[in-house]
Amino acid sequence: MTQAAPALQASHLAKRYAGGKGVGDVNLTVEQGTITGFIGVNGAGKSTTLRCILGLSEPDAGTIEIFGERATFRTRRSIGFLPEERGLAPRERARDVIAFHARLRGIPRAHAYERADALLARLGLGGREHTRIGELSKGNAQRVQILCALAHDPALLILDEPFSGLDPIAQAEVRALFAEYRGKGGSILFSTHAMAFAEELCDNVVILSQGRTVFEGPVSEAAIAGGRHGAYVVSPDDEAVLAAAHSVGGEAEAMTGSTMGAVRWRILLPANVTHPVLMRALAMRQVQIFEFRPIEQGLEAALWDHVLEERSVA
Amino acid sequence: MWRVLLIAEREFKAYATTGSFWVSLLMGPMLMGLAALAMGAMRVEPASHVVSIRTERAEVADIVKGSLQEAAALSGQAVEFAPPDTTAGTQITIRNGRAEVTDGRVNKLEAALLRRDLYSIQLADQLAAAGLEPEPRSVPKAAKPAVTTSAKPGTNPVAQFAPVFLLWLTLIGALGMLLQSVVRERANRALEHLLAGARPAEIVFGKLLGVGAVSLLVLATWMIGSAALAATSLGSAPSMLAGLASPAAAAYAGAIYVMAFLLYGSALVCIGAFASDLPTAQNLSRPVFGLLLIIFFLAMGSVLGLGEQLAWLIWLPPFTPFMLLLSPEGALSPWQHAALWTLMGASTVAITAAASRTLIISPRPLWARKAA
């Protein structure tokens, strides 16, 4: 029995824009029937990679295969895409815009409208079919945009930040929709900064740093690979925080933004140092603490691990 | 092809489903009607008038006719001469070197020229009476009007320029719509959503077709409004578009409009796709609109007597549609027509191809393309 070709495979993808931004060596695979998270800090190259995969930007090097075939306009038609910035015309009506995207991929008119109505009902927008996009709330407009990506029943969904702008209820509905879609055999690649969603939803994860793939594999492996954990500490006592972190073998880094003279610190700890040990070290130095939020071992820690490692290599 | 039509339908609906579009659409013929009414109210009496000249000397009658013809040519009117015994029209009697208008009237220019020429006759008579030989005086010929060469002899320059003006006006409006359509979708990334489902060339042609249909609807409304005005004989506005009266002429003008729209439209799509926001697009498109302004004035100059000097502009694709509209019937051979249309077509294809490439974010040069 032969193994099914991956829904998407990008190898050694490179794209440099004028000014040096872009990606240098991206590798990623989305197996059929799986959800893959695409994570990385801002500017890591996620959107550039997605644009190359979708043919919106031409890569300088590398190969892209969709369901085992070289990426062309025809093979890309099996992809449903949600761009990062939402660009629906305010005057368009919800069902019209969904049906338009379905028809653009060859779905007959009548079927496209039927499907639009069904999708709207599925995401709790039944009865809002004729509402103009400009009259919908931001969250509902976002739901309509997600439905546009699903309109032609694609075999592969590529979503750029699908959860941004959604309230918790809408986020839950969309997560359920994605799970249902995967249950039917669909494959998803989505970029996100929401690590909790990625851990909950994804089978695999691809971590991008400075335009390179630094990790690709199951979420569980990524979480384990992120051996370092730590805490976010908000405190006005800069020197004492640094001393306390160093005393337990950790690294403290000031983050942007301060509140009432206090700085937000990210302290990463070795695997064998627990949070109470750090708190004790801070207390011994009489550090004034406004906030203490643990960074648990997991995707977020893994991301930090990889990003810091890349930076030190650079 | 259906994707082109689908995108075109979407573009068309984006404008045609707004109430303001229909209001502004109907405003055009209404304004034209008002203008025609105003022109009708200000209309001067018919330009041609009949004159009979009574004099005992035949050479004086010739000189008077010459004076009146000169005045008619200068004022753009026509004059007809009736036999001396006719009672209709203006009757001028020449007695003792003086002109007496016994019926009807002469205008100030005619009076001045009559006075000038009758004075020269008196002068010649006095010289002859004194025994001097006056210089032979030729009968004044009808002077050439100050403004002469129009590309289409015998037509009113205003009527000749009207189709060019209509093309220019509609084109400017359509190009503005097209630019906004592309820039808006480029700025809010809707273009990326569209590009994920359609080829760049399909998007370019879809937008051109959709916005082109909107502008053709505007143009047709104006034309039909004009025809309705002609039917009600309201005024001179319909006669301004007399050059487009026949179906063949209207179809020819329509084809020129479509080609002009494709040529300039694809250039504007190119600029809109290249720009990241509306201010940038406006800055980048300024030279195109500047060029159109130059073309407008050169076309006007061509109508007002510079036709021969500017005839070569027809071979520059941006000028071709406008100069074709001004070109007199039969002035160009079929081969020249074929060459001009081929040139315009080739330019349009080249710019459309460039526009399609520009829709791709940061495309690689064609010579460096390699399948990914």
Image (tube, rainbow, N blue to C red):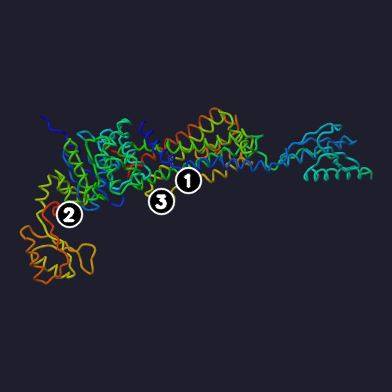
Instruction: Give the letter of the chain under mark 2.
Output: A
Q: Amino acid at mark 2?
A: Val
Mark 1 touches mark 2? (CB < 8 Å): no
Which residue is painted at 9% across and 54% down in the image? A227
Marks 3 and 1: which is nearer the front?
3
- Mark found first going from the N terminus, 3 or 1: 3
State the SS at label 2: helix
Q: Is residue B265 left or right of residue B84?
A: left
Residue B36, position in %: x, y? 62, 40
State the SS at label 1: helix
> Do the residues at pointers 3 and 2 share their chain?
no
Tag 1 residue: B288
Residue A43, position in %: x, y? 25, 52
The 10 Å Cα crowd at callout 2, few under 14, some 14 to 19, many 20 or more, is: many
Q: Which quadrant, please, contains the C terminus of chain B?
A: top left
Mark 3 touches mark 1? (CB < 8 Å): no
Which residue is painted at 13% across and 57% down in the image? A295
Instruction: Give the letter of the chain under mark 1.
Output: B
The residues bearing labels 3 and 1 have C-alpha atoms spaced at a distance of 14 Å
Whether B230 is drawn above or below A205: the answer is above
The 10 Å Cα crowd at callout 3, few under 14, some 14 to 19, many 20 or more, is: some
Tag 2 residue: A307
> Considering depth in this image, is B156 or B3 the residue closer to the camera?
B3
Residue extending farthest left: A272
Residue B152, position in %: x, y? 63, 34
Residue extending farthest front: A127
Q: Amino acid at mark 1?
A: Val
Q: Quadrant of residue A281?
A: bottom left
Query: Is any atom of residue A128 visible in this view?
Result: yes
Mark number, residue B280? 3
